[in-house]
């Protein structure tokens, strides 16, 4: 084979790899939709599609926040416990304060928890191993606080019209939880792609030392990514509690892994420096569709955990092959 032909084949391989990298997640989504619609006649109905969007809104909010952390080269195991603790607080204190005050209190919990995670990571210049230990510690701490606050029981929901509208209201045909998810995703997509802060997050995850030498305040950016993740978890807590009309101290268990899985499926690199909010949202949707079709076929929650575990392993394997 001539040198020219070898170069052409090499160029074609690079082009195909780049095409798969850029659009593979969208092709996978279309393929999944086709397969599921063939497998079940009730899948591709308006009612079921809206149910899927409602169900993914919580994980979607969490995953969008997690995208910032993971692009920045870290990850956060505490978001599930932030969701739990912020959730029991926002419900528990509404007997003494108004709904807006309770909402602000929940947001502050998310902000402060994220700030503490981020500050420790920034001060010690932590890597992914440090992130695991620090956020695992925060996860355990907040989970214990949620159990202590509630005594281990589920709290009854709020009667506030404002709070209930967050969980059960509509804006036109769109449920509020879905609208909140969409708004957060659009804002975060803009921040990551169109602002100096967003460029700093990519640089931080791609090459910490180079970003520091270029004049970027890497410590502030690193801490800020965890604040964003914590705030997203607090918002998710309010949405899920308003939907379910109550708050369980263990309601956030497992959500951190769902969020991380969605982010990895969306193409965000485990080593940082690469990712997209838009593709994370597609990853969230893929997980939601898989869960929905398994429900339609009567698979148990435990069966779904097995499937999610396999998806996580595959996602990590594909990430290692990049």
Image: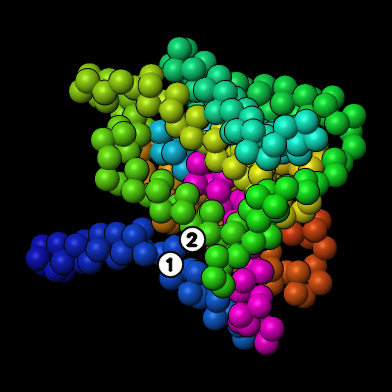
Residue 271 percent location from the top left of the image: 43, 36
Residue 294 percent location from the top left of the image: 73, 69
- Decide if residue 185 is on the left or right side of residue 312: left
Q: Nearer the viewer, residue 214 or 95?
A: 95
Pair 1/2: label in front: 2
The image's colouring method is rainbow
Q: Give the number of marks.
A: 2
- Decide if residue 190 is on the left or right side of residue 185: left
**Magenta stretch encompasses residue 58:** yes
Q: Nearer the viewer, residue 44 or 175?
A: 175
Q: CA distance from mark 1 to mark 2?
A: 7 Å
Residue under pointer 2: 282
Q: Quadrant of residue 172?
A: bottom right
User: In percent of the image, x 68 and y 60: which residue is there?
Assistant: 168
Q: Main secondary structure of the magenta part?
A: helix
Q: Nearer the viewer, residue 317 or 269?
A: 269
- Decide if residue 131 is on the left or right side of residue 18: right
Given contact means CB atoms under 8 Å apart, are the residues at marks 1 and 2 in contact?
yes
Q: Which mark is residue 269?
A: none
Residue 229 percent location from the top left of the image: 53, 36
**Magenta stretch encompasses residue 305:** no
| Residue 83 to residue 185: above or below | above
Write the start and end of the magenta stretch as one range. Answer: 39-65
Residue under pointer 1: 26
User: In percent of the image, x 62 and y 45: which residue is there?
Assistant: 236
Question: What element does badge 1 sit on?
Answer: helix
- Residue 282 in sight from this viewpoint: yes
Few, some or many residues within 10 Å of mark 1 (<14, 14–19, 20+): some
User: In percent of the image, x 55 and y 19: which residue is there?
Assistant: 116
Which comes sooner in the sequence, label 1 or label 2? 1
Question: What element does badge 2 sit on?
Answer: helix
Q: Quadrant of residue 177?
A: bottom right
């Amino acid at each position: 084979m001539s040198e020219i032909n070898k170069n052409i084949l090499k160029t074609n391989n690079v082009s195909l790899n780049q095409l798969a990298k850029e659009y593979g997640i969208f092709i996978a989504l279309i393929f999944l939709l086709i397969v599921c619609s063939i497998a079940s006649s009730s899948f591709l109905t308006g009612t079921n599609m809206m149910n899927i969007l409602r169900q993914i809104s919580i994980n979607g909010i969490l995953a969008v926040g997690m995208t910032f952390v993971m692009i920045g080269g870290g990850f956060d195991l505490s978001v599930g416990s932030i969701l739990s603790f912020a959730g029991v607080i926002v419900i528990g204190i509404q007997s003494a304060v108004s709904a807006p005050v309770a909402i602000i209190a929940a947001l502050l919990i998310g902000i402060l928890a994220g700030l503490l995670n981020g500050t420790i990571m920034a001060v010690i210049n932590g890597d992914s191993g440090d992130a695991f230990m620090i956020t695992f510690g925060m996860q355990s701490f907040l989970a214990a606080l949620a159990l202590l606050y509630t005594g281990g029981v589920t709290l009854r929901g709020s009667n506030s019209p404002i709070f209930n509208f967050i969980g059960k209201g509509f804006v036109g045909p769109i449920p509020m939880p879905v609208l909140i998810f969409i708004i957060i995703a659009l804002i975060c997509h803009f921040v990551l792609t169109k602002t100096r802060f967003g460029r700093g997050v990519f640089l931080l995850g791609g090459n910490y030392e180079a970003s520091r030498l270029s004049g970027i305040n890497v410590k502030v950016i690193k801490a800020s990514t965890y604040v964003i993740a914590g705030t997203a978890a607090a918002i998710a807590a309010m949405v899920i509690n308003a939907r379910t009309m109550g708050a369980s101290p263990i309601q956030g268990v497992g959500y951190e892994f769902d969020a991380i899985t969605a982010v990895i499926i969306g193409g965000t690199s485990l080593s940082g420096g690469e990712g997209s909010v838009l593709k994370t949202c597609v990853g969230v949707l893929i997980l939601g569709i898989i869960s929905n079709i398994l429900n339609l076929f009567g698979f148990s929650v435990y069966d779904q955990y097995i499937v999610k575990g396999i998806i996580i392993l595959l996602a990590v394997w594909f990430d290692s092959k990049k």
